[in-house]
C-alpha cells in the first residue's frame, strides 16, 4: 500500500509508558529526518513513578511529572520541533477526533495506540471507523509476546482492518478506562519484559518509517516474541511471492 511522501504529517500517540516511552525519541528523530512539516501530540494522564524506572524510558529526575509532558518537552527540544501534549487520559471519541484533525488540509494523519488497556483500544477502533482517512498503528504485548497491527482508512473505506479485526476480544464491553479503575485494580499490572516493550516500539517505528519515509507499507500485522527473538509479519500472498523470487535471484547470483 502506498502513501504520500510530500504532504505534512500529523501524529497523535496515546500512551507514553512501557512502549510509548520507547517510541517517542525515535518518532521525533524520524520526523526530523524527513524534512516535512510535522506535528506530534503525545497523550497520557499518568505520572512517572519509581517502579517505572525499571523498564520505561524515564530517569529519576522525571519522578512525579506527567509522562506525556516529560517526553514531549525532552524530545521536541532535542530536535527543534513544536511541543504538544495532553496530560490526561483520552476517554471520549469526540476528544480523540478533535486531536486527529490538523489545522491544514491534505495531511497524512496517523494514530499510534501504545496503551495497556482494551477500553482505550475500543475508543481508537470507534474513531478509526468514523474517520475518512486515517492510519492507525496499535501495539500490544504481554510478558514477552505481542503484536503490532496497522489499520488504514482511505476515502471513508477500510483498506486494512485495525487490531480489533484480528483480535475481536478487544471489544469486550466490560473493560475499563484507567480513570475508572479502583485503587486496588490500578495497582495490579500484568508483568512485561523491558525487551518486549522495546521490540514493540521498534516494530511500530519500522511501520512508521516505511509509511513516512518510504511511502509504502506491505505488512498488515506483525507478531513477535522477545523470548525467542522471533518476528513474524503478515503480508499479502502476492507480495510474499515477489519477495521469494527476489531472494532466489539474489542467492543465484551469489
Image (tube, rainbow, N blue to C red):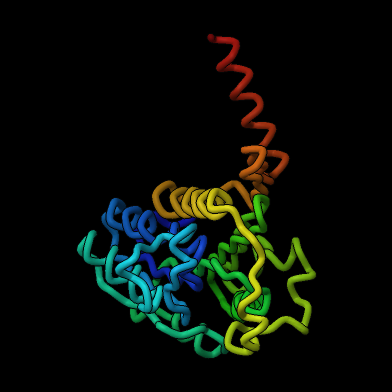
Give the residue displayed 43% in from the left and 57% down from the top.
4
Whether residue 210 sits left or right of residue 165 in the image: it is left
Percent x, y of residue 235: 67, 44
Give the residue displayed 53% in from the left and 71% down from the top.
133
Percent x, y of residue 172: 78, 78
Q: Nearer the viewer, residue 131 or 55?
A: 55
Q: Nearer the viewer, residue 205 or 136?
A: 205
Residue 62 visible within the image: yes
Q: Nearer the viewer, residue 7 or 250?
A: 250
Q: Is residue 206 above or below residue 174?
A: above
Task: Name the image quarter holding residue 66.
Answer: bottom left
Give the residue displayed 47% in from the left and 54% down from the top.
208
Task: Name the image quarter holding residue 78.
Answer: bottom left
Q: Is residue 235 above or below residue 134?
A: above
Q: Is residue 91 above or below residue 19?
A: below
Percent x, y of residue 227: 65, 42
User: Total of numbered circles in the picture?
Assistant: 0
Percent x, y of residue 1: 57, 51
Residue 100 visible within the image: no
Give the residue displayed 68% in from the left and 84% down from the top.
176
Amino acid at each position: 500500500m502506498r502513501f504520500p511522501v510530500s504532504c505534512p504529517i500529523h501524529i497523535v500517540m496515546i500512551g507514553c509508558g512501557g512502549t510509548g516511552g520507547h517510541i517517542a525519541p525515535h518518532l521525533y528523530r524520524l520526523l526530523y529526518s524527513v524534512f516535512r512539516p510535522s506535528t506530534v501530540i503525545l497523550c497520557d494522564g499518568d505520572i512517572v513513578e519509581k517502579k517505572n524506572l525499571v523498564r520505561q524510558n524515564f530517569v529519576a529526575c522525571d519522578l512525579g511529572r506527567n509522562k506525556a509532558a516529560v517526553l514531549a518537552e525532552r524530545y521536541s527540544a532535542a530536535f527543534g520541533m513544536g511541543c504538544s501534549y495532553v496530560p490526561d487520559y483520552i476517554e471520549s471519541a469526540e476528544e480523540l477526533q478533535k486531536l486527529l484533525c490538523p489545522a491544514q488540509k491534505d495531511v497524512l494523519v496517523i494514530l499510534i495506540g501504545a496503551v495497556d488497556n482494551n477500553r482505550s483500544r475500543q475508543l481508537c477502533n470507534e474513531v478509526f471507523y468514523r474517520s475518512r482517512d486515517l492510519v492507525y498503528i496499535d501495539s500490544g504485548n504481554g510478558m514477552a509476546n505481542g503484536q503490532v497491527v496497522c489499520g488504514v482508512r482511505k476515502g471513508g473505506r477500510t483498506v486494512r482492518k485495525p487490531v480489533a479485526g484480528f483480535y475481536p476480544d478487544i471489544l469486550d464491553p466490560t473493560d475499563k478506562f484507567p480513570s475508572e479503575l479502583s485503587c486496588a485494580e490500578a495497582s495490579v499490572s500484568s508483568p512485561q519484559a523491558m525487551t518486549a516493550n522495546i521490540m514493540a516500539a521498534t516494530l511500530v517505528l519500522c511501520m512508521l518509517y516505511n509509511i513516512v519515509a518510504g511511502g509504502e507499507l506491505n505488512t498488515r500485522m506483525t507478531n513477535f516474541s522477545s523470548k525467542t527473538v522471533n518476528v513474524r509479519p503478515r503480508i499479502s500472498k502476492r507480495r510474499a511471492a515477489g519477495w521469494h523470487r527476489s531472494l532466489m535471484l539474489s542467492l543465484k547470483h551469489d
